[in-house]
Amino acid sequence: KFPRKVNARFLSMAVFLGGLIAVFAISTMITTPIARVVEAAEGIAEGNLAQTAAVDRDDELGRLARAFNHMVGSLQSAQNELSEQNRHLEERVACRTRDLQQEIDERQRAEEEIRGQRSFLRQIIDINPNFVFVKYHEGRFTLVNQAVADAYGTTVEVLVGKTDADFNANEAEVNAFR
């Protein structure tokens, strides 16, 4: 038979080893699910929203993993909705840009046509040897042909916006053509 001292040592050692195994088992049961959640969180932080934490328990750690997975699902839904809204906004911006470009092109064509018509009208007015002019009610020239400008000894551009008084000091003549 073993002496009592050896039995006590053996029993102490067995209790110690049993306790160590129990502590290891309990800590593994706690840290493994937490490590899974941490691993999933790191994957999500890197942009992988498909990553979830494995749930195989019904205790607090299982509730934590389910809550984490629910949060990830909500985040993924929000990101999908945001992406859809962004795509829709980009489509609207592209459509509006096309519309604006079409309006710009139409305005440029219209402006070019107006410039051509003005040039043609200017040629017709300037070819006429008779005085052709239009005045505002206060007597300022708004349109004159080359014959009127020649009579005043100036250019068409200088004459527009001026009055007879700007070129003629005779007040009676100015009032007669007002």
Image: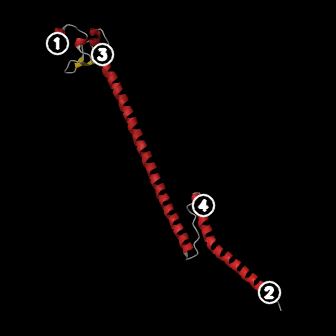
Name the residue tied to disc 1.
175
- Residue at 19% of width from left, 11% of height from top? 174
For marks 4 and 1, the one nearer the N-term is 4
Mark 3 vs mark 2: give the one in front.
Answer: 2
Q: CA distance from mark 3 to mark 2?
A: 134 Å
For marks 3 and 2, the one nearer the N-term is 2
Name the residue tied to disc 4.
42
166 vs 70, nearest the viewer: 70
Identify the disc placed on residue 5.
2
**Circles 3 and 1: CB distance less than 8 Å?**
no
Element under disc 1: helix
Name the residue tied to disc 3.
126
- Label 3 crowding class (10 Å Cα cut-off): few <14, some 14-19, many 20+? some
**Circles 4 and 2: CB distance less than 8 Å?**
no
Horizontal and vertical percent for residue 177?
A: 18, 13
Element under disc 3: helix
Task: Give amino acid for label 3.
Answer: Asp
- Residue at 38% of width from left, 32% of height from top? 109
Taking the image as drawn, is residue 130 in sight?
no
- Residue at 33% of width from left, 22% of height from top? 120
**Circles 3 and 4: CB distance less than 8 Å?**
no
Using the rendered view, name the quadrant where residue 33 is placed: bottom right
Mark 4 vs mark 2: give the one in front.
Answer: 2
Horizontal and vertical percent for residue 87?
A: 47, 52
Task: Give amino acid for label 1.
Answer: Asn
